[in-house]
Amino acid sequence: MNRKTLVKLAAVTAAMTALAGMSASAEGLKIGYTCMDGTNPFFVALEGAIREVVEANGDELISVDPGNDSNTQIDQVEDLISQNIDLMFVNPVDADGIIPALDALKEAEIPMFGFDTEVGDMSYLVSYAGSDNYNAGYVCGEDLAKKVPEGGDILVLDSPTMQSVTDRTNGFLDAIEESGVTFNVVGQQDAQGNQQVSNEKATDLLTANPDVVAIFGGNDPTALGAYAAADAAGVTPLIYGVDGSPDVKALLKDTILEGTGAQSPITIGKTIAETAYAWLDGEEVEAYIPIETFLVTADNVDDYGTDGWQ
């Protein structure tokens, strides 16, 4: 019985013992990969980490990029199924919108491994690895409350369809509420996790609210868009993002970019890929694997460097 047959058998019966002792690199597999935005530097690094593990095992990784469009993502997953993939790495554009694609994968008996952003029903997944997104936003809110104890008006640029960004936003808002410092959210808009869109949204919000003391962006591209808008407007709110990207870390010491809730796409990618291979080899794996997040500011950025991801 070859590896492809074993993978299908495992997906149907969940009989881990049927895979025991089998090497995941005995015969090449065809493995699918989808993320919400393949152009985001975070996902570029994450895909590279997964690809490194897959290719080291002699297998093929086929990556698709839906460009933040849920319908496109479903279509692309269905196309991957038609290419007879054996396993799928999944990051949804929309947590609930991805469900039809997960149904199709389940019907095709293809095991699914999630990363970075949870799907609407986690029971579809064999395992999931992702950052503690709530904490990534929370540490930004904590830092803001310490640095602006007098409070003030703030802007929030989020992306409600992206569960990871929603979790970060909730963490940020909870932290400032729990701090006891009075902050007023005078503008909150969907920036779609996109630098260009967030620039436009921040420009509109800053025009209406030029005296804000801070802006929170749900990811680093959004924070960079807000920074460009604030710089053009000649205003100096403290700006926070989430990712810990090299681009933002390089600006922390000399600009109004104040901090980033850092995560490690390399660790996420490597962790979920190695987990998938452990499962293929018949090992029991954790259903949910949290990856640490932490705050990077001008005070500690030298510890992490600015020329790559942590």
Image: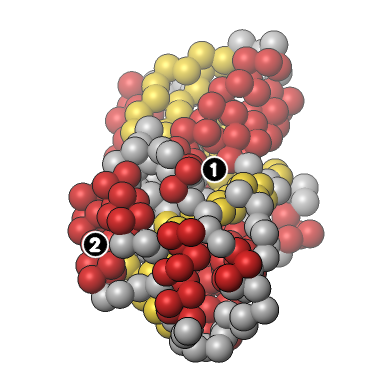
**Viewer-closest of 225 and 68:** 68
x 35%, y 29%: residue: 189
Percent position (x, y) of residue 49? 56, 72
**Between discs 1 and 2, the one toward the N terminus:** 2
Q: CA distance from mark 1 to mark 2?
A: 34 Å
Name the colour scheme: secondary structure
- Where residue 197 sits, quadrant-wise, is top left
**Quadrant showing the C terminus:** bottom right
How packed mark 1 is, by other alpha carbons closer than 10 Å (few <14, some 14-19, many 20 or more), is many
Percent position (x, y) of residue 179? 70, 17
- Where residue 248 sits, quadrant-wise, is bottom right
Q: Tell me the element at label 1.
A: strand
x 61%, y 11%: residue: 182
Q: Amino acid at mark 1?
A: Gly
Percent position (x, y) of residue 61? 42, 77
x 70%, y 28%: residue: 142
Residue at the disc numbered 2:
78
How packed mark 2 is, by other alpha carbons closer than 10 Å (few <14, some 14-19, many 20 or more), is some
Residue 168 visible from this viewpoint: yes
Q: Amino acid at mark 2?
A: Glu
x 67%, y 65%: residue: 283
Residue at the disc numbered 1:
241
Residue 222 visible from this viewpoint: no
Percent position (x, y) of residue 86? 40, 72
